[in-house]
Amino acid sequence: MKHKPRKPMVPRTAQETTRQAIVALLTEGPVSAKDISTAVHLPEKEVSSHLEHIRRSLHATGAVLAITPAECRACRFVFAKRDRMTPPGKCPVCRSEAIDDPLFSIRGVQEHEPD
Ligand SMILES: [Zn+2]
């Protein structure tokens, strides 16, 4: 066999449709998993797995899934290292549970922000 076995692409599954809807939301601007969850009627857990998938598939196109890290509202601690899609439950510094959710958006290849 010369080719690696590939899963056949299933056209227009419910999953695909949902993913496209999520991509559309991400393209429009920064949204939290909660926002997406509300918009596409999926639990946040499933939204997170879609986000993981989207992040990986975007890689091939050159676009990126930009993540604004979660931030503690009480002490402004930024959860910068946290690379997960789910928001942290508690601030490790002040133990506050008032955490701003991480925000996600899709950035094209051209947009290059100095960082
Ligand atoms: Zn804090």
Image (cartoon, rainbow, N blue to C red):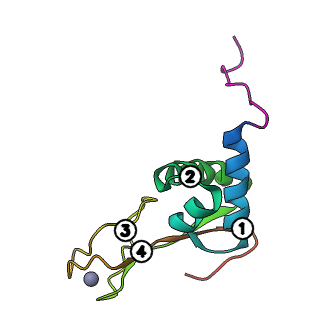
Q: Alpha-carbon distance for marks 2 and 3?
A: 26 Å
Mark 1: which secondary structure? helix
Main SS of residues in magenta: loop
Q: Is residue 15 visible?
A: yes
The amino acid sitting under disc 4 is Ala
Q: Which residue is mark 2?
A: 42
Q: Alpha-carbon distance for marks 1 and 4?
A: 19 Å
Q: Mark 3 or mark 1: which is in front?
A: 1
Marks 1 and 2, the one that precedes in the sequence: 1
Give me the residue at 73% from left, 62% from top: 24
Mark 2: which secondary structure? loop
The amino acid sitting under disc 1 is Thr
Q: Alpha-carbon distance for marks 4 and 3?
A: 10 Å
* Residue extending farthest bottom: 75
Q: Which residue is mark 3?
A: 81
Q: Position of residue 30 (x, y in %)?
A: 61, 74
**Total residue callouts:** 4
Q: Name above or below for residue 83 compared with residue 31.
A: above
